[in-house]
Structure formats: C-alpha cells, structure tokens
Image (spheres, grey):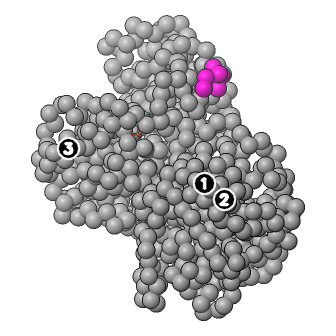
C-alpha cells in the first residue's frame, strides 16, 4: 500500500521525510518521491525503485532544503510503476503538489471535465486528476482550503491526500476517505502520516483524522475543519506501539493482519467493477462477442492461486456452463494443452512474476489462446503480457502465505463468471441482478467471520500438536480443503493433505490413526449428508474431526457425534459465494496452529513470496 508522510516544522524536512519513508518500506512500493517548499517554489524529486534511489538523487535531502514538505512511497494501482507516475504530482501550472493513497474511482470522468477546462495531463494516474481538480477550484476561489473541500466532494473512491500550495508554502493540508491518515503532533513541528510507524521516532502524539475531515498544519499548530469548513477540535492520543508492532498495525504478524484486512481488500477489488446494477470490467476491452465465442476455459496458476482456480471452476461452470479445467502452471506448459482461438486461458497471480505461470501464459498465447489475468502487482510481467488484466487492488501482501490475494482473486473470479453468464445468456436477468446485489455485500459477510478468531485460536491449541492432519470435503468444499491444507503446511509445518471426501475409502483411510485430526469442510449443503458420512468413517477409526460449516447447518453437524468432535460455523450466505467466507476460518486455523508451534509465520522456511524460477 502507498505510504504518506508530511512535515511542517523548523528542521530540514527532506531528511525527516526520507527517514519516514524508510519506515514505510515494509509495506511494499515501487517508486517514491518528495516535494519541499522553498523560496515560494515547490521543489519535487521522484525516483523509481527503492528509496535509496530517491535519497541518492537528493544527496540525502541536502539538495532539497526547506522545512515543509511531503513524501510518498507508491504501490501502483493506476499507471505503471515508474518515475513519471511516482508521487508527488503537481498541478498543470505548478501551483499545487499532492501525494495520494487509494484509488479515485471516477477519475476518468473528472479528467474529461478538467481537459474540457483546458488542463493538460502528463501521467496515467488518478492522482494527477486529484491535484488538477484542486487547482481548478483554487483558480476559482483563491483559497486552497476551500479548493480542497470542493474537490474532495467530487471525488469517489478511497483517498488519503497530502497537499501543499506554492502560495502557502508553510502549510500542509490533509484529507481522507476510506484510507488511513493521521496527524502527528510534535514540539513546534507537525506531521501527516498514513501509518504511525513513520513518525514514532519523533512523536507518539497523534490525532485521528476521520472521513471527509480536513486538517491544516503549520509548524505552530493544527486546525481541523469539517467538509463544510466548520472548525472543530479533537483529543490527541498516545501511540503505545513499538515500531515493530506498528508496522503490523498492532497485529503480531502480517498474516493475521492480512487475514483481517480481507473485507477491505475484497471491497477494493469489487467496488470499481460493480456499479449501477451492472459489471464494469474497467476498460478491459474484452468484447461480449469474444466472451460468447469461448468454448473452453483453462485456469492456470501456482500454489494458492491455483486453488482459487479450483473454486472458480465450480462457479464458472455452474453460472456460465463453459467447460473449465484447472491445471498447475508448471504442468500446463508441458501438457500439450488442447487450445484453439476459442479457448480462454485465465491466469491468477499475486506477484505477477511467478515463472511457471509466465511460461504457461506464453505457451497459451503461442497456441492461439487469449489470456485474461487476475493479478495484484500492477505492471508485473503477467499483467503486461496478458490480453486483459484485472487488478485485485489488495495492496502489498507481505506474508509469504497468501490470504488476501486468495480472497480478492476469488472475488474477481465471481465477477468474471457472472459476466460470462450474462453475455452468454446462461443466467436469468433476475438471478443475475440478485447475485450482483449479494456480491456487493460480500465484504461485510467476510467481516462477519472475523469474530470466529477466538474460538479458532482455542481449537488450534487442541489440534496443533499433531504432525499429520487431513482436510476433506466434497465439490467446492474439496477445493476449500485443498487451500486449507496448503495454508496449514506453509506456516505450521504440519504435514497435511486434502482429499475429496469420497476418495478416503479408496486408500488414504489407511493412514487414519487414533487422534488423527481431520478437518472436514461441510459448508456445501447439497452434499452435507455424504460429507458427514465420510467424517463418520474416519471418526470411527479414531480420527478427531473438526467441521467447518454454516450457521444453518450447525445444529445438524454439531449434534452428529458419530461424525464430528468440534465445529466452526460461518454465517450463512449465498451458496455460490460461500467459499469466500469458509476460507477465513481455515486461514485462521493455519495461523493459530503455527502460532502454537512457534514457527516463523510471515517468512516460513524454504518459501519465497514469489517463485521466479522454474
Ligand atoms: C501462497 O500461500 C504461496 N506463497 C504460494 O503458493 C503462491 O500462491 C504461489 O507461489 C503463486 O504465487 P503468485 O500468486 O504470486 O503467482
């Protein structure tokens, strides 16, 4: 996620801004920049890549003297990760500079408006639209605070903004909506930060800025106003965190932080695509005619991304009735796949740099397929080489074990499946509208599973001691079992395997011993009885069964003492999208088992965040 720091004080701003940006490096970024107000001018330096590149460019800040400035680390969402697109962005005419976190969803409409007013644009970013919109209102009113308030009222989406105006060089203005931004208060110096980690070495006194509020900072003080410019005051708070835990937002590990972030990440993935009762694949250019022509779909990826594909297969086939095959990328490329110009290949990848997935993509294209990718890292190889790319907007995923990438890829898989079904006429319009309406509530439904955390932590303490664990399920529950087993292995080092529940009696059941844990995913109601009978098979042979089911099935599952020992129940939700809820307890279970076993959760042994070799 991007990082923001602003400074207004008596010390040289640039070294303080660079130090704060370094504190934000852990959040992941691809470029960085500074703006410092000096002698009535805004002096900007930006650099692609690491902050060290930026620091070298300004000789550690010496080349940017001045006591008021803004700094930014960018995680690209709109526009490639390069120096041009790095922040700060300056308005056409050069009077106003802005740093921005988030995505302004209506930026194309706003840019068209500004172009019609004669504004020129030089980057691909939504941020340049924001700074020019502020400049437009500033030109009208001559009051930069008024201009910020006017512009903020017209922007849709998520934003945290830091603003400096050439005509008020000792002042920083800040505002936000659905993105974190804090004011930090020092001795004759004040800061804005998107993450308190960046300023803990200077001050622990903060003021939380709330959505639509605006802060005006100088070295002498902080003024807070509402979106209607009415002044108000707010108590300061003292940050108790140390830097290490602040980097994780107060969580013990990135993994549990990222599990908890999933409602917001899924919202960021879905909201630009679900509007006005329709699906907008944000300018992909994929034609309805092409989607109607598709006769076969391959989903190819690696690891967790491929297990998203296992769930997506069920949803695509159920909704769009297109034969869909999920193939590991490392297998796909050597499997002589049957591909025609009516074959759609979907690749899934968090990093966009997984070697096997890149190779599979290239092989698919070489054979004449079109490739749609669902990717998190903007401008990555997979994103650039695909015919169409849907970004998940999940922000950097720091933990090696993928959680929010899984959930956002899965959410976008539903969107693709619904789009296919709609254009191919395999879904009734009423059902389409109903599913779209329900899908828009998915973030809140996922959030409703998070309180299961305590129960899952307790259960993990009772299961984590075993060195072998099995996961079983049927249909889409089997696909979930595969990812649940994968997550457990990655972070707890417990040997684990997932099996189609109906397969157990054909061999694997020989491995069941007294006390062998078997996690039974039993959320798919049409096959519940079958799944419970498979659970009873293993329980009768000594297994300890932990079931994951839904609230409405809880009574039936929990009361079946021949099949189940422990039960986790997720809230009820549309069956098609239930995997997005059922995966949460499986992720948490893996996390808490690892916590019990004291493993290196965020950076498990032998694993890399992106496997860039074959
Ligand atoms: C996920 O928990 C793992 N780190 C791994 O399986 C990962 O999903 C796989 O390597 C694919 O990575 P990608 O999504 O970046 O392509």
Residue 557, x across and y down, in percent: 53, 29
Residue located beneath label 3 in the image = 364
- Identify the magenta region: 594-600
Residue pictured at 46% horizontal, 10% vertical? 512
Residue at (43, 37) in percent of width and height: 610
Query: Is residue 163 among what the camera can see?
Result: yes
Structural distance between the alpha carbons of marks 1 and 2: 7 Å
Q: Earlier in the sequence, mark 1 or mark 2?
A: 1
Of pointers 3 and 1, the one earlier in the residue sequence: 1
Question: Considering depth in this image, is 155 or 50 the residue closer to the camera?
Answer: 50
Q: Is residue 599 magenta?
A: yes
Residue indicated by mark 1? 55
Q: Please indicate whether residue 517 sits to the left or right of residue 147 in the image.
A: left
Mark 3 element type:
helix
Crowd band around label 3 with a 10 angstrom C-alpha radius: few (<14), some (14–19), many (20+): many
In the rendered image, which residue does mark 2 sit on?
61
Classify residue 452 by image quadrant: top right
Depth check, front residue: 46 or 308? 46
Left/right of residue 24 with respect to residue 155 in the rendered view: right
Badge 1: how crowded within 10 Å, few (<14), some, or many (20+)?
A: many
Tag of residue 291? none
């Amino acid at each position: 996620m991007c990082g923001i720091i602003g400074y207004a004080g008596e010390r040289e701003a640039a070294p303080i801004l660079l130090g704060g940006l370094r504190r934000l490096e852990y959040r992941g970024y691809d470029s960085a920049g500074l703006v410092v107000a000096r002698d009535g001018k805004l002096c900007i330096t930006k650099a692609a890549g690491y902050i060290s590149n930026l620091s070298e460019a300004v000789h550690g800040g010496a080349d940017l003297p001045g006591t008021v400035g803004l700094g930014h680390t960018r995680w690209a969402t709109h526009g490639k990760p390069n120096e041009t697109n790095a922040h700060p962005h300056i308005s056409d005419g050069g009077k106003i500079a802005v740093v921005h976190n988030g995505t302004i969803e209506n930026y194309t409409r706003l840019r068209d408006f500004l172009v019609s007013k004669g504004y020129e644009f030089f980057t691909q970013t939504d941020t340049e639209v924001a700074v020019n919109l502020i400049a437009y209102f500033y030109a009208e009113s001559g009051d930069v605070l008024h201009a910020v308030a006017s512009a903020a009222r017209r922007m849709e989406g998520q934003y945290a903004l830091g603003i400096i105006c050439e005509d008020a060089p000792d002042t920083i203005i800040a505002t936000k909506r659905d993105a974190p931004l804090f004011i930090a208060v020092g001795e004759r110096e004040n800061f804005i930060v998107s993450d308190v980690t960046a300023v803990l070495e200077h001050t622990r006194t903060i003021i939380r800025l709330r959505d639509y509020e605006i802060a005006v900072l100088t070295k002498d003080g902080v003024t807070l106003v509402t979106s209607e410019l009415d002044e108000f005051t707010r108590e300061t708070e003292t940050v108790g965190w140390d830097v290490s835990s602040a980097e994780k937002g107060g969580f013990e590990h990135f993994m549990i932080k990222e599990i908890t972030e999933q409602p917001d990440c899924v919202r960021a993935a879905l909201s630009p695509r679900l509007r006005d009762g329709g699906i907008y694949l944000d300018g992909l250019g994929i034609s309805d005619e092409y989607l109607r022509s598709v006769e076969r779909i391959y989903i190819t990826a690696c690891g967790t991304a491929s297990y998203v594909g296992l769930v997506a297969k069920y949803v695509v086939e159920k909704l769009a009735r297109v034969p869909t095959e999920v193939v590991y990328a490392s297998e796909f490329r050597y499997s002589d796949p049957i591909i025609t110009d009516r074959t759609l290949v979907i690749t899934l990848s968090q990093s966009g740099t997984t070697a096997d997935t890149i190779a599979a993509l290239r092989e698919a294209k070489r054979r004449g397929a079109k490739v749609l990718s669902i990717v998190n890292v903007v401008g990555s190889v997979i994103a650039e080489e695909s015919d169409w790319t849907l970004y998940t907007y999940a922000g950097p995923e720091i933990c090696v074990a993928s959680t929010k990438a899984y959930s956002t890829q899965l959410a976008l898989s539903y969107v693709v499946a619904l789009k296919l079904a709609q254009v191919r006429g395999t879904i009734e319009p009423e059902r389409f509208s109903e599913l779209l309406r329900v899908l828009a509530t998915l973030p809140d439904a996922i959030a409703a599973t998070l309180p299961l955390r305590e129960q899952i932590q307790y259960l993990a303490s009772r299961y984590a001691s075993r060195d072998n664990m099995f996961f079983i399920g049927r249909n889409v529950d089997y696909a979930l079992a595969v990812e649940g087993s994968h997550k457990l292995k990655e972070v707890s080092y417990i040997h684990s395997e997932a099996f189609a529940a109906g397969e157990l009696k054909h061999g694997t059941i020989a491995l069941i011993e007294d006390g062998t844990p078997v996690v039974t995913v039993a959320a798919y109601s049409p096959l519940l009885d079958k799944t419970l009978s498979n659970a009873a098979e293993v329980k009768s042979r000594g297994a300890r069964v932990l079931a994951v089911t839904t609230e409405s099935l809880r009574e039936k599952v929990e009361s079946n003492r021949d099949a189940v020992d422990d039960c986790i129940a997720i809230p009820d939700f549309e069956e098609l999208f239930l995997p997005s809820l059922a995966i949460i307890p499986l992720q948490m279970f893996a996390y808490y088992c690892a916590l019990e076993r004291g493993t290196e959760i965020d950076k498990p042994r032998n694993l890399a965040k992106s496997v860039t070799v074959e």
